[in-house]
Amino acid sequence: MKNEIRITYPFANVMGLFFPVGKLEDGGTCEFATPKCLKKCCAHTPGAGTIIGHEKKQEAYNFFLRNSIATIVKQIRAELKETNCNIFTWFASGDCPAYLTMKFLNVIIKLDRAGVIQTGFTRNIELWKECKKLSDNNKTLLTVENIKDIPKYSEQSGMYSVPNYEIGAIDIYFVTFTKVRKTCGCGGGYYEHHIKDSERVLPHLKLDCKACYEKKVGCFTKCEALKKGGLIGKKQLEMK
Protein backbone atom coordinates (compact mmCIF):
# COMPACT_ATOMS: atom_id res chain seq x y z
CA MET A 1 0.00 0.00 0.00
CA LYS A 2 1.22 3.43 -0.88
CA ASN A 3 -0.90 4.94 1.88
CA GLU A 4 1.10 5.03 5.13
CA ILE A 5 -2.05 4.95 7.23
CA ARG A 6 -2.78 1.59 8.82
CA ILE A 7 -5.81 0.67 10.91
CA THR A 8 -5.57 -3.15 11.05
CA TYR A 9 -2.89 -5.31 12.64
CA PRO A 10 -2.22 -9.06 12.89
CA PHE A 11 -4.39 -10.83 15.45
CA ALA A 12 -5.35 -14.50 15.76
CA ASN A 13 -3.71 -15.32 12.41
CA VAL A 14 -5.93 -12.79 10.61
CA MET A 15 -6.18 -8.99 10.64
CA GLY A 16 -7.83 -7.23 13.55
CA LEU A 17 -9.05 -3.80 14.54
CA PHE A 18 -7.80 -2.36 17.83
CA PHE A 19 -9.63 0.51 19.53
CA PRO A 20 -8.62 2.16 22.84
CA VAL A 21 -9.69 0.22 25.93
CA GLY A 22 -11.52 1.88 28.81
CA LYS A 23 -14.46 4.09 29.70
CA LEU A 24 -15.53 6.81 27.27
CA GLU A 25 -14.73 9.54 29.79
CA ASP A 26 -11.18 8.17 29.97
CA GLY A 27 -10.72 8.17 26.20
CA GLY A 28 -11.68 4.53 25.71
CA THR A 29 -14.44 2.91 23.65
CA CYS A 30 -15.83 0.38 26.11
CA GLU A 31 -19.12 2.11 26.89
CA PHE A 32 -20.91 -1.10 27.86
CA ALA A 33 -18.13 -2.84 29.77
CA THR A 34 -18.68 -4.04 33.32
CA PRO A 35 -16.25 -3.03 36.09
CA LYS A 36 -14.89 -6.59 36.09
CA CYS A 37 -14.34 -6.48 32.33
CA LEU A 38 -12.48 -3.17 32.53
CA LYS A 39 -10.24 -4.55 35.25
CA LYS A 40 -9.50 -8.00 33.84
CA CYS A 41 -9.92 -7.59 30.06
CA CYS A 42 -7.48 -9.79 28.14
CA ALA A 43 -6.92 -6.90 25.69
CA HIS A 44 -4.43 -5.57 28.24
CA THR A 45 -2.21 -8.56 27.40
CA PRO A 46 -3.40 -9.78 23.98
CA GLY A 47 -2.18 -13.09 22.65
CA ALA A 48 -1.64 -14.50 19.18
CA GLY A 49 -1.22 -11.09 17.64
CA THR A 50 0.79 -7.93 17.35
CA ILE A 51 0.85 -6.04 20.64
CA ILE A 52 0.29 -2.43 19.69
CA GLY A 53 0.36 0.62 21.90
CA HIS A 54 -2.32 3.15 22.73
CA GLU A 55 -1.12 5.53 20.02
CA LYS A 56 -1.91 3.10 17.19
CA LYS A 57 -5.26 2.23 18.74
CA GLN A 58 -6.08 5.92 18.90
CA GLU A 59 -5.04 6.37 15.26
CA ALA A 60 -7.46 3.64 14.18
CA TYR A 61 -10.24 5.14 16.29
CA ASN A 62 -9.60 8.63 14.90
CA PHE A 63 -9.69 7.24 11.37
CA PHE A 64 -13.20 5.92 12.03
CA LEU A 65 -14.29 9.21 13.53
CA ARG A 66 -12.92 11.44 10.77
CA ASN A 67 -13.61 9.47 7.59
CA SER A 68 -16.66 8.37 5.63
CA ILE A 69 -17.98 4.81 5.59
CA ALA A 70 -16.78 4.36 2.00
CA THR A 71 -13.25 5.51 2.92
CA ILE A 72 -13.08 3.21 5.93
CA VAL A 73 -14.27 0.20 3.89
CA LYS A 74 -11.77 0.99 1.13
CA GLN A 75 -8.93 1.20 3.67
CA ILE A 76 -9.80 -2.09 5.36
CA ARG A 77 -10.16 -3.94 2.05
CA ALA A 78 -6.83 -2.53 0.85
CA GLU A 79 -5.08 -3.69 4.02
CA LEU A 80 -6.66 -7.14 3.79
CA LYS A 81 -5.53 -7.42 0.17
CA GLU A 82 -2.02 -6.29 1.06
CA THR A 83 -1.75 -9.00 3.73
CA ASN A 84 -3.47 -11.65 1.58
CA CYS A 85 -6.14 -12.08 4.24
CA ASN A 86 -9.91 -12.29 3.76
CA ILE A 87 -10.86 -12.59 7.42
CA PHE A 88 -11.29 -9.48 9.54
CA THR A 89 -11.89 -9.45 13.28
CA TRP A 90 -13.08 -6.26 14.88
CA PHE A 91 -12.53 -5.22 18.47
CA ALA A 92 -9.37 -7.16 19.14
CA SER A 93 -9.41 -4.44 21.78
CA GLY A 94 -12.04 -1.85 22.62
CA ASP A 95 -15.66 -1.85 21.45
CA CYS A 96 -18.28 0.11 19.52
CA PRO A 97 -19.79 2.95 21.60
CA ALA A 98 -23.48 3.73 21.05
CA TYR A 99 -22.90 6.88 19.02
CA LEU A 100 -20.87 4.91 16.46
CA THR A 101 -23.33 2.02 16.11
CA MET A 102 -24.85 3.03 12.77
CA LYS A 103 -21.56 4.03 11.20
CA PHE A 104 -19.79 0.88 12.28
CA LEU A 105 -22.75 -1.26 11.26
CA ASN A 106 -22.66 0.12 7.74
CA VAL A 107 -18.94 -0.59 7.47
CA ILE A 108 -19.69 -4.18 8.49
CA ILE A 109 -22.55 -4.43 5.99
CA LYS A 110 -20.43 -3.22 3.07
CA LEU A 111 -17.61 -5.59 3.98
CA ASP A 112 -20.14 -8.41 4.23
CA ARG A 113 -21.51 -7.61 0.77
CA ALA A 114 -17.94 -7.62 -0.55
CA GLY A 115 -17.50 -11.18 0.71
CA VAL A 116 -15.16 -10.38 3.60
CA ILE A 117 -15.39 -12.96 6.40
CA GLN A 118 -15.86 -11.16 9.72
CA THR A 119 -15.80 -12.02 13.39
CA GLY A 120 -16.37 -9.79 16.37
CA PHE A 121 -17.13 -9.69 20.08
CA THR A 122 -19.14 -6.76 21.36
CA ARG A 123 -21.22 -5.62 24.32
CA ASN A 124 -23.18 -3.26 22.06
CA ILE A 125 -26.56 -5.01 21.93
CA GLU A 126 -27.99 -2.98 19.03
CA LEU A 127 -24.93 -3.67 16.87
CA TRP A 128 -25.17 -7.37 17.68
CA LYS A 129 -28.88 -7.52 16.82
CA GLU A 130 -28.35 -6.01 13.40
CA CYS A 131 -25.33 -8.15 12.54
CA LYS A 132 -27.57 -11.22 12.95
CA LYS A 133 -29.27 -10.16 9.71
CA LEU A 134 -26.11 -10.49 7.67
CA SER A 135 -24.69 -13.42 5.73
CA ASP A 136 -23.19 -16.54 7.28
CA ASN A 137 -19.78 -14.96 6.69
CA ASN A 138 -20.44 -12.67 9.66
CA LYS A 139 -20.03 -14.14 13.14
CA THR A 140 -20.90 -11.61 15.81
CA LEU A 141 -21.02 -12.58 19.48
CA LEU A 142 -22.60 -10.59 22.29
CA THR A 143 -20.43 -10.67 25.39
CA VAL A 144 -22.20 -11.14 28.74
CA GLU A 145 -20.71 -11.87 32.15
CA ASN A 146 -22.89 -14.91 32.75
CA ILE A 147 -25.10 -17.04 30.52
CA LYS A 148 -27.91 -16.41 33.05
CA ASP A 149 -27.87 -12.76 31.91
CA ILE A 150 -29.33 -13.69 28.52
CA PRO A 151 -33.08 -13.79 29.34
CA LYS A 152 -33.15 -10.05 30.06
CA TYR A 153 -32.63 -9.33 26.34
CA SER A 154 -35.81 -9.20 24.26
CA GLU A 155 -34.04 -10.34 21.08
CA GLN A 156 -32.15 -13.15 22.75
CA SER A 157 -31.46 -15.68 19.97
CA GLY A 158 -27.94 -15.61 18.59
CA MET A 159 -24.33 -16.21 19.57
CA TYR A 160 -22.93 -15.22 22.94
CA SER A 161 -19.54 -15.18 24.60
CA VAL A 162 -18.94 -15.52 28.32
CA PRO A 163 -15.44 -14.52 29.47
CA ASN A 164 -13.23 -16.72 31.59
CA TYR A 165 -10.87 -14.07 32.89
CA GLU A 166 -8.69 -16.50 34.77
CA ILE A 167 -7.45 -18.32 31.66
CA GLY A 168 -7.95 -15.52 29.15
CA ALA A 169 -10.58 -17.31 27.08
CA ILE A 170 -14.34 -17.40 26.47
CA ASP A 171 -17.14 -19.94 26.34
CA ILE A 172 -19.30 -19.77 23.20
CA TYR A 173 -23.05 -20.30 23.35
CA PHE A 174 -25.64 -20.65 20.58
CA VAL A 175 -29.02 -19.56 21.89
CA THR A 176 -32.47 -20.02 20.37
CA PHE A 177 -35.85 -19.29 21.93
CA THR A 178 -36.11 -22.93 22.96
CA LYS A 179 -32.65 -23.85 24.19
CA VAL A 180 -29.14 -22.76 25.14
CA ARG A 181 -26.36 -24.75 23.53
CA LYS A 182 -22.77 -24.47 24.74
CA THR A 183 -20.53 -25.56 21.91
CA CYS A 184 -16.91 -24.69 22.49
CA GLY A 185 -14.69 -21.74 23.27
CA CYS A 186 -12.20 -19.26 21.92
CA GLY A 187 -8.64 -18.54 22.95
CA GLY A 188 -5.68 -20.84 23.40
CA GLY A 189 -6.32 -21.04 27.13
CA TYR A 190 -9.74 -22.56 26.50
CA TYR A 191 -8.36 -25.63 24.77
CA GLU A 192 -5.43 -25.93 27.10
CA HIS A 193 -7.65 -26.06 30.19
CA HIS A 194 -11.01 -27.48 29.06
CA ILE A 195 -10.62 -30.06 26.29
CA LYS A 196 -9.31 -33.41 27.51
CA ASP A 197 -9.19 -36.96 26.21
CA SER A 198 -8.56 -39.79 28.67
CA GLU A 199 -7.35 -37.16 31.17
CA ARG A 200 -4.73 -36.01 28.70
CA VAL A 201 -4.86 -32.42 27.54
CA LEU A 202 -5.13 -32.37 23.77
CA PRO A 203 -2.53 -30.43 21.75
CA HIS A 204 -2.75 -26.71 22.39
CA LEU A 205 -4.93 -24.99 19.81
CA LYS A 206 -3.78 -21.43 19.37
CA LEU A 207 -6.06 -18.45 18.98
CA ASP A 208 -6.51 -18.79 15.22
CA CYS A 209 -9.55 -17.42 13.37
CA LYS A 210 -8.30 -18.81 10.07
CA ALA A 211 -8.06 -22.36 11.44
CA CYS A 212 -11.49 -22.08 13.07
CA TYR A 213 -13.02 -20.92 9.79
CA GLU A 214 -11.42 -23.76 7.83
CA LYS A 215 -12.39 -26.41 10.41
CA LYS A 216 -15.80 -24.83 11.16
CA VAL A 217 -15.20 -24.67 14.90
CA GLY A 218 -15.37 -21.83 17.43
CA CYS A 219 -17.43 -18.92 16.09
CA PHE A 220 -17.79 -20.77 12.80
CA THR A 221 -19.37 -23.90 14.28
CA LYS A 222 -22.34 -25.02 12.23
CA CYS A 223 -25.60 -24.75 14.15
CA GLU A 224 -29.32 -24.61 13.49
CA ALA A 225 -30.64 -21.43 11.96
CA LEU A 226 -31.27 -18.71 14.52
CA LYS A 227 -34.27 -16.44 14.31
CA LYS A 228 -33.30 -13.04 12.95
CA GLY A 229 -34.11 -9.93 14.87
CA GLY A 230 -33.42 -6.22 14.99
CA LEU A 231 -34.73 -2.71 15.15
CA ILE A 232 -33.10 -0.85 12.26
CA GLY A 233 -34.83 -0.41 8.91
CA LYS A 234 -33.35 -0.73 5.43
CA LYS A 235 -33.33 2.99 4.69
CA GLN A 236 -31.29 3.67 7.80
CA LEU A 237 -28.79 0.99 6.76
CA GLU A 238 -27.88 2.89 3.64
CA MET A 239 -25.80 5.62 5.25
CA LYS A 240 -23.18 7.27 3.07
Image: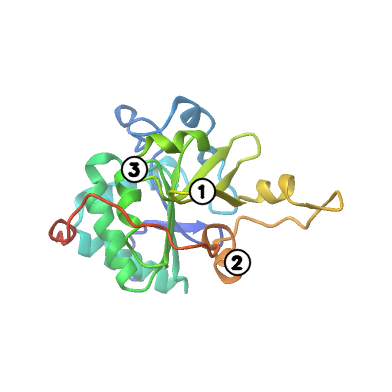
Residue beneath disc 2: 211
Q: Residue at x 55, y 39 (%)?
A: 163
Instruction: Inspect this view and state whether residue 129 appears.
Output: yes
Of residue 175 and residue 190, the one placed in the foreground of this image is 175
Q: Is residue 6 above or below residue 21?
A: below
Amino acid at pointer 1? Lys
Separation of marks 3 and 2 at Cα, in angstroms: 27 Å
Residue beneath disc 1: 179
**Residue 28 falls in image quadrant:** top left
Could you say whether the residue bearing mark 3 is in a helix, strand or loop? Answer: helix
Could you say whether the residue bearing mark 2 is in a helix, strand or loop? Answer: helix
Q: Residue at x 46, y 37 (%)?
A: 144
Amino acid at pointer 3? Ile
Outermost residue on the front side: it is: 178
Q: Are marks 3 and 1 in contact (CB under 8 Å)?
A: no
Quadrant into which the C terminus falls: bottom left
Position of residue 75 measured from the top left corner of the image (x, y, whole percent): 30, 65
- Disc 2 crowd, CA 10 A, few/some/many (<14, 14-19, 20+): some
Position of residue 9 measured from the top left corner of the image (x, y, whole percent): 46, 57
Residue beneath disc 3: 125
Amino acid at pointer 2? Ala
Q: Residue at x 22, y 41 (%)?
A: 99
The disc, 3 or 2, on the residue closer to the chain's N-terminal end is 3
Instruction: Inspect this view and state whether residue 3 appears.
Output: no
Position of residue 1 measured from the top left corner of the image (x, y, whole percent): 36, 71
Q: In this rendering, would 12 be left or right of 188?
A: left
Q: In this rendering, would 171 be left or right of 101?
A: right
Q: Are marks 1 and 2 in contact (CB under 8 Å)?
A: no
Of residue 160 and residue 148, the one placed in the foreground of this image is 148
Position of residue 146 measured from the top left corner of the image (x, y, whole percent): 52, 34
Could you say whether the residue bearing mark 1 is in a helix, strand or loop? Answer: loop
